[in-house]
Amino acid sequence: MNEYMILPKDLIHKNEKRYFWLVLVISILTYIVLVVSIVGILILLGIAIISLFLNALMIGNIRTNAVRLSTTQFPKVYTTAEELCEKMGITKVPDIYVMESSGMLNAFATRFFGRNMVVIYAEIFELINTNNEDELNFILAHELAHIKRKHLSKQMLILPAMWIPGIAELYLRACEYTCDRYAAYYTGNNEAAKNSLTMLQLGKIFIYMSTRLNILSN
């Protein structure tokens, strides 16, 4: 048996399940209230159509302007993604793209019609050229963790609660903490984990001045 299939329970942040049930109950109650009237049904349909349309625009932009990783396109990073998926028990490697980001440092996972996708901004992808590949691997593992935890497939189910300021942030932040733990565990590099999280806070300056930064003092 693959040792990575035995997942320590403490990788899941203690608040993720708690806040998921909160947003789930709020969303279900909202759906019940809306479906008892014609106006409510129209509102639900409108929200679903708008969400689908915006998601389709984003996916179209990614597929048009980004480069998809494969065994022949950035094969080393793609192989790392395959290995991480195997460790995490993700049966199918998601589509992974590198996209120009006008200097932004970020990455995200998304889902469209049952197909998972990970997008890494080009500024982060440059870590390959600065001997920071471990940090890139951590970020990739973080996004794959969203897929493993099914955060993407739950979005429509809890959509109403995601429009409530404060409530949405509580759940989303707990999810981020969980994915950070997954990424640190499966990459096995705590130093790279700290560096990656610091880099996402500071921006590209971290890449060039990391040796001067005292992370422990923050």
Image (tube, grey):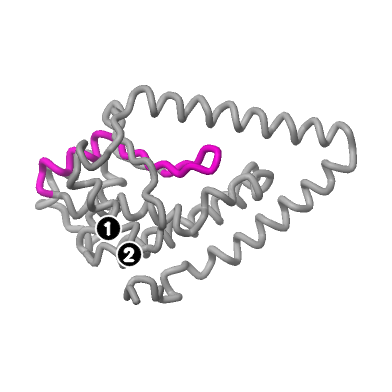
Residue visible at 38% across and 53% down in the picture: 144
The front one of 214 and 172 is: 172
- Residue position marked by numbered label 1 in the rendering: 83
Q: Secondary structure at mark 2?
A: helix
Q: Secondary structure at mark 1?
A: helix
Quadrant containing the C terminus is bottom left
Tell me, yes or no, whether the highlighted magenta stretch contains residue 118.
Answer: yes
Q: Which mark is residue 87?
A: 2
Amino acid type, callout 1:
Glu
Q: What is the magenta range?
A: 109-131
Residue visible at 26% across and 40% down in the picture: 70
Residue visible at 29% across and 53% down in the picture: 82
The front one of 217 and 5 is: 5
Tell me, yes or no, whether the highlighted magenta stretch contains residue 93.
Answer: no
- Considering every residue shown, the one lying at the far right of the view is 37
Report the number of numbered marks.
Answer: 2
User: Residue 142 in the image: x percent, y percent?
Assistant: 36, 54
